[in-house]
Image (cartoon, helix red, strand yellow):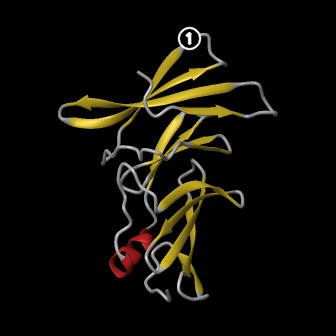
Amino acid sequence: MIAYPGLAVDYPSSDQYKLVSISKLAENYNLFYKLHVLSSERSVLWHEIQLRSNTFSDFVVGSPPVYWRNFLYWFRVDGSVLAFDTKREQAVILDRPEFVDQFDSIYGKILIGHDIHDIWLGVAQGLLSLVCIFKKCIVIAAYDYNMTGENVIIGYAVSVTGCRHQKLKDGYSGSSC
């Protein structure tokens, strides 16, 4: 069964492709991710990669994976992102930016769930971006990530009712929205 499929093609620089699907792996009452990879570069059709993490979360329905700079990104229901490096064939979980949580208590929870309409994951201005729409504020987080473990997140909060905006950093402790 192909669940949560993602397609990686580096056209026009390459005619190579990878099809990646993700399924659940149950082991001793714990759930993990199993990534199934079909590559035009290998003679073996499918091979599997396991990702064990402290938390298991389903993926958001209606939010297709994003392919950007040799990575496939899936948006998880808890607001974090599963990132798969298509060159190294390694996967990691990117945590939800901490500063986004502050706006939850002030402006109402974002509807993180299986089918959401007030949050978006995609590429903008050359960066993987997370856009969260609250009642009075829009928060934009841009990930600058590489597999060395560095994860720099820059954020902006824009007031819907006025024209004030504020640049944020991960771990931000105030709001002007």
Expressed as whole percent of the image width and height from the top left, the position of residue 9 reads 69, 32
Question: Residue drawn at (57%, 47%), measured in percent from left and top?
Answer: 147
Question: Residue drawn at (49%, 78%), measured in percent from left and top?
Answer: 137
Residue at the left extreme, as displayed? 29
Expressed as whole percent of the image width and height from the top left, the position of residue 105 reads 33, 78
Question: Residue drawn at (59%, 60%), measured in percent from left and top?
Answer: 129
Residue at the top extreme, as displayed? 43
For disc 1, the neighbor class at 10 Å (few under 14, some 14 to 19, many from 20) is few
Nearer to me, 92 or 18? 18
Residue 70 located left or right of residue 28? right
Q: How many marks?
A: 1
Give above or below for 173 relative to 16: below
Give above or below for 11 relative to 60: above
Quadrant in the picture for the N terminus = top left
Nearer to me, 95 or 105? 105
Q: Which residue lies under the disc numbered 1? A: 44
Expressed as whole percent of the image width and height from the top left, the position of residue 114 reads 36, 48
Nearer to me, 130 or 149? 130
Nearer to me, 74 or 112? 112
Residue at the right extreme, as displayed? 12
Residue 107 located left or right of residue 120? left
Expressed as whole percent of the image width and height from the top left, the position of residue 106 reads 36, 82
Residue 14 located left or right of residue 101? right
Q: Amino acid at mark 1?
A: Val
Question: Residue drawn at (54%, 81%), measured in percent from left and top?
Answer: 160
